[in-house]
Amino acid sequence: MNDLNVAHNNTENIEVIDQRTIVQQCIDSVQCLSEDRGNRILIIEDNRTLAEVMAMIFEDFGNVEIADNGSIGLNKIIRTYFDVIISDIEMPIMNGIDFFYNALKFYPNIRERIVFCSGSSKEAHQHFIQKHCLRYLSKPFDTEEIRGIVYQIISETSR
């Protein structure tokens, strides 16, 4: 009991915060939360110009982030939840297929939130898409079509 009093009476290093400061910090925290509650979309694409165009297509859906390859994309999904992930298949460092298999370890139902886009017509890629029943668009794709797919994913996963 005396130790508690001694510790309590030692106020040299304690910063006094008035009630208005605490209230303002709470308000700021809530505002940050509400600003960050929009849909989160991750675009994994090694063609930076295409990735930036896609980001502009979805800027009215919420927060959009870009990753230049599957490895960067994987690091992003480990740290942050994304409502939708749009991924190229052929990329350096880590391709979209390897990204998918690694992402499954963290999110077993990620299949529901991902759409692949590719200009490749390789049989192995088509087999991968069919085997996992994944959404897929060939490049070049129609802007309204990809917006519709992303809207559908957001609608389905928000239920």
Image (tube, helix red, strand yellow):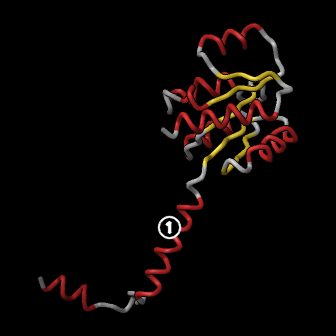
Q: Secondary structure at mark 1?
A: helix
Please tell me which residue is depicted at 68% across the width and 47% down the height of the picture. 61
Whole-percent x, y for residue 37 in the image: 56, 54
Look at the picture and state if 11 lies above or below 134.
Answer: below
Whole-percent x, y for residue 124 in the image: 72, 9
Describe residue 70's horizontal placement relative to residue 92 as left or right.
Answer: left
Give the mark count. Answer: 1
Whole-percent x, y for residue 56 in the image: 80, 47
Q: Tell me the crowding category of disc 1: few under 14, some 14 to 19, or many 20 or more residues within 10 angstroms, Cα based.
A: few
Describe residue 33's horizontal placement relative to residue 6 as left or right.
Answer: right
Whole-percent x, y for residue 17 in the image: 42, 87
Quarter assignment of residue 4: bottom left
Quarter assignment of residue 66: top right
Instruction: Note whether residue 114 is visible.
Output: yes
Specify the farthest residue to the left.
Answer: 1
Name the residue nearer the viewer: 142 or 44.
142
The residue that mark 1 highlights is 30
Please tell me which residue is depicted at 38% across the width and 87% down the height of the picture. 14
Please tell me which residue is depicted at 85% across the width and 35% down the height of the picture. 47
Please tell me which residue is depicted at 59% across the width and 38% down the height of the picture. 154
Quarter assignment of residue 95: top right
Look at the picture and state if 54 lies above or below 4.
Answer: above
Q: Amino acid at mark 1?
A: Val
Look at the picture and state if 8 lies above or below 44.
Answer: below
Describe residue 118's horizontal placement relative to residue 96 as left or right.
Answer: right
Instruction: Note whether residue 15 is visible.
Output: no
Name the residue nearer the viewer: 91 or 155.
155
Q: Quadrant of the N terminus?
A: bottom left
